[in-house]
Amino acid sequence: MAASRNKSPSNPAAEVAGFLETRLGPADVVCVGLSGGCDSVALLHATAALGLGDRLCALHVNHGLSPRAGVWADFCAALCARLGVRLTIESVTVDRASGLGIEAAARNARYAVFSRCPANVLLLGHQRDDQAETLLFNLLRGSGIAGAAGIREERTHGGLRVLRPLLGLPRAAIEAYALEHGLEWIHDESNDDTALARGFLRREVFPLLMRRFPGGDANLARAAGHFAEAAGLLDELAALDWVSAADGEALRLGKLRTLSPARQANLLRYRLRQLGWQAPAAVRLSEFCRQLQMAGADRHPELLLPEGRMHVSRGLLYWEPMK
C-alpha cells in the first residue's frame, strides 16, 4: 500500500461532480470499478462524497494473477466499509491460452463481469496518462482511427453506460488528491513489469519522451480526442449506410457493393462493434470485402471470427454468433 502525509491541492472531486451532474438521472444506479489502485480509490472517494446513498455501489474483479490478489480484495472490502459503500467481489479465471496476451485476456474477463454489473452506470478511473499510453500503444499496433481514439470518455457496453470522469486529469493530480485526503491504495506490481507492453511504455518509453517533449502526455491525450471526433463522424456515416443497406439484422449485398471499399469496411467494423465482436485485422477485412464485391451468385463468402461468422446467403450478409 502507498500513502503519504504530503499535501497538494487538486480537483478530482470537482471534476467528478461536474462530469456526473449532466450525465446522471435521478433513477440511475452507479457502480465504481474498484481495482484498489490510486485512480479507482480516488474515484470512489470523490463519488461517495456526492451523496448518492444506496444508488452507489462498487465492484472489484479478482483476476487471480497476483499472489497478493486476496490482499487487494480485502483492502477494497475495508475501504468500502469505511465509506459506507456496498461492494461486490467477483473472481475470474483469465484465459492464458486465448492467444490475446495476458493483458487483453484479463480485460475480456473483466468486461464479462462488468456486463453483470448491479447498476446501469459504471464509472472507471482511467486518467489522462492512461489515455496517452493507450494512444501510443494502439498506434504501435497499427490500429486505425477507432484505436487512435484511445479510451472513450463515455460509451455503452451492452445495456451498461461506461463513464470515465477522471479522463481529463493527469495521474499526478489524482495522486495529489489521494494524498491530500489521507487515502491509501494498492500498488499493482504488474505495472512495473517491463515484459508487459504497457509496463514497458510506462516505465521505459514515457519518461524518456516526457524529458524530451514536456507536456507531450497532454498533447497525446488531446490528439486522442481529435481521433475520437473523427471516429464519431465515421460512425455517423456507417449508421446512415446501415439504414440504407439493412434488411432486418442483415445487409443487402447489392447495396453494400455500391459503397466504396473504405465505406464497406467502415460499415462492417461499425456492425461488429454494435454486436460486441472484435474486428479482424485490416488485411483480413479488406480481403473479405474484396470477396463480397467479386462473388458470383453461386459463391458464399464467409469470415470466421472468435465470436461467430459473417457469411452470405441469398444475397444477404449475416452475422451468426458462435454456438
Image (cartoon, rainbow, N blue to C red):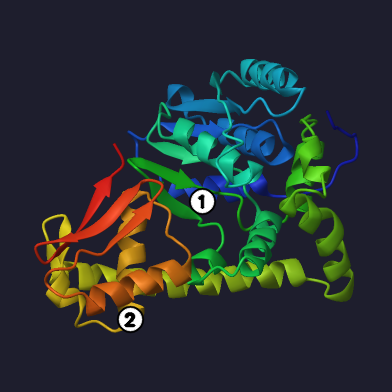
Please identify, in this view, whether the residue under mark 1 or under mark 2 is nearer the observer: 2
Q: Position of residue 178 (x, y in %)?
A: 76, 38
Q: Position of residue 262 (x, y in %)?
A: 36, 80
Q: Could you tell whether 272 is left or right of 79 in the image?
A: left
Q: Secondary structure at mark 1?
A: helix
Residue behind mark 2:
261
> Looking at the figure, which quarter contains the C terminus?
top left
Quadrant in the rendering for residue 65: top right
Q: Is residue 23 above or below residue 221?
A: above
Q: Position of residue 204 (x, y in %)?
A: 86, 59
Quadrant in the rendering for residue 160: top left
Disc 2 crowd, CA 10 A, few/some/many (<14, 14-19, 20+):
some
Residue at 16%, 71% in the rendered image: 253
Residue behind mark 1:
19
Q: CA distance from mark 1 to mark 2?
A: 39 Å
Q: Could you tell whether 169 is left or right of 114 in the image?
A: right
- Closer-to-camera residue (245/243): 245
Residue 17 visible in the snapshot: yes
Q: Name the N-terminal-most of marks 1 and 2.
A: 1
Residue 237 visible in the snapshot: no
Residue at 78%, 50% in the rendered image: 199
Residue at 60%, 50% in the rendered image: 15
| Amino acid under disc 2 | Pro
| Amino acid under disc 1 | Phe
